[in-house]
Image (cartoon, rainbow, N blue to C red):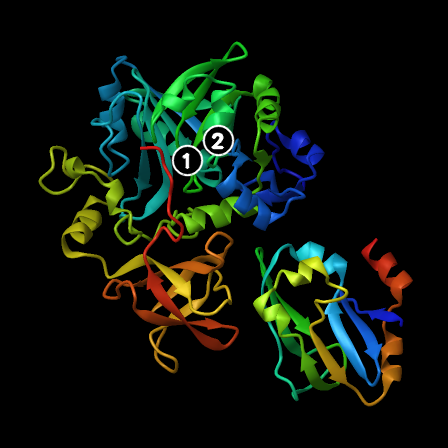
Amino acid sequence: MADLKRTVFYDLHVELGAKIVPFAGYEMPVQYPMGVLKEHLHTRSDAGLFDVSHMGQVILKPKSGRYEDAALAFERLVPVDVAGLAEGRQRYGLFTNDEGGILDDLMFANRGDHLFVVVNAACKDQDIAHMRAHLSDVCEVIAITDRALVALQGPKAEAALEGLVPGVAAMKFMDVAILPWAGVDLWISRSGYTGEDGYEISVPEAQAVAFARALLARPGVAPIGLGARDSLRLEAGMCLYGHDIDQTTSPVEGNLTWAIQKARKAGGAREGGFPGEARILRELAEGPARRRVGLRPEGRAPMREGTVVYAGTEGGEPIGTITSGGFGPSIEGPMAMAYLPATLKDGDTVYADVRGKRLPATLAPMPFHPTSYKR
Amino acid sequence: MTMKYTEDHEWLRVDGDVVVVGITEHAAEQLGDVVFVELPEVETMVAKGDDCAVIESVKAASDILAPLDGEIVAVNDKLVDNPGLVNEDPLGAAWFFKMKIDDLSVLDQYMDEDAYKDLIG
């Protein structure tokens, strides 16, 4: 595995018995001895600790010192209301391209006098270059390379973290805070990628392993690998960049219109002004031709990424493709996401070609498993 | 009763005049949690190397190949309702299918337990 990077937790993963796989240029734990299925269920019943240090952490520091200046500059790149985000709050965002496709999805937070942005591992180098190219007139774009990132997710996450970092229990879903632990600042948000209540915590690398060990010593906390991270996010109806959304899919096709606030839509205070606005505003007004939907296969057979979908049991041209699919341990059955004609609605049946057989699947609302955020 | 092993990590066990086929502990462990099993139809004639069952874990789908020419005479329907049995008892309760073959000596081409253990290191 030459050229692959390791996070600061690599030795801890190995010590904990992880099976390591290459992912987004890193050697990452795909599972621990508990196994994917039990890790998934453990996160839903107790708490799971995930190493997400491969993701990119970036600070956008306005030269003027005013949040609003960084926010308005950032709005050039995302079809999202950044200026209207309150201090201490986080929001989901998307970098779009000139064709209205999605370059990456991300989280950003208003931290008073600057923006804190977290982007996907596989996209972070181009995201940072993209921000430097378009924001450097207004902001300093600072890639944070000396901090690790972990996620603590599940119903026991609050008690586990509150025991180490008093104050986190008072945070609400999508709040951010900087709180001390062992003499260092933790950058904490109440958010995640599992549909569970929980936190994402940025910690200086020098203290990261000690912090992870302290969390693992708390009641109910177990290490969880990328395998369960994927089935958890899919049950929660969340997109995996490069699979469910990419440079060819618009936010409207991706069923992410909820991420485009009123201020950036037609008639809004800061209408348009983001890459691909022509296509995105048109699709918002007229509706897209295709849309990302949830599918529940009728039998037990999982329908995997790349599976072709048809309208009927025989003949006809494909009407779409599955972009993520697998087995949902909490819903005890298969689940998938697909891009299908926008004329279809929940409850309609389509047929996916699984090993030469067309098996029925029903369009179903997402999330497949209910979320449990602390709002 | 001796077991034979294939390079595809299947085990074969002679039981009277039929051969019982399953996957090895090593295979079950490598696959991870099994969530779906599709079995062949009884009374199907298969040729060695044919895809004749499907096993899906949380990670991926894999084919189970017919290890011999012959007829499928029984399948283990319990796996369809409880795929996790493959992880719990791969060498016992989680057999996949039984085949009737003309000449049991064709089993000699496959590895014994020691040779299989060498293969998986």
Q: Secondary structure at mark 1?
A: loop
Residue B66 drawn above or below residue A120: below
**Which chain letter matches label 1?**
A
Residue at 57%, 29% in the rendered image? A219
Chain for numbered disc 2: A
Q: Which residue is mark 1?
A: A197
Q: Residue flagged by tag 1: what amino acid is it? A: Asp
Please indicate, yes or no, whether residue B48 appears anywhere in the rendered image.
Answer: no
CA gap, disc 1 to disc 2? 7 Å
Q: Which mark is residue A10?
A: none
Q: Position of residue A171 (x, y in %)?
A: 36, 24
Q: Tag 2: residue type?
A: Ala
Q: Position of residue A292 (x, y in %)?
A: 33, 56
Percent position of residue B107, x then y: 85, 78
* Vertical placement of residue B61 versus A10, above or below: below
Q: Which residue is mark 2?
A: A157
- Counting other residues with Cα less than 10 Å from the Cα at mark 2, is it few (<14), some (14-19), or many (20 or more)? many
Q: Is residue A334 above or below residue A128?
A: below
Q: At x 62% / y 33%, what residue is drawn?
A: A6
Instruction: Kindly indicate the quadrant of the structure image that contains residue B7.
Output: bottom right
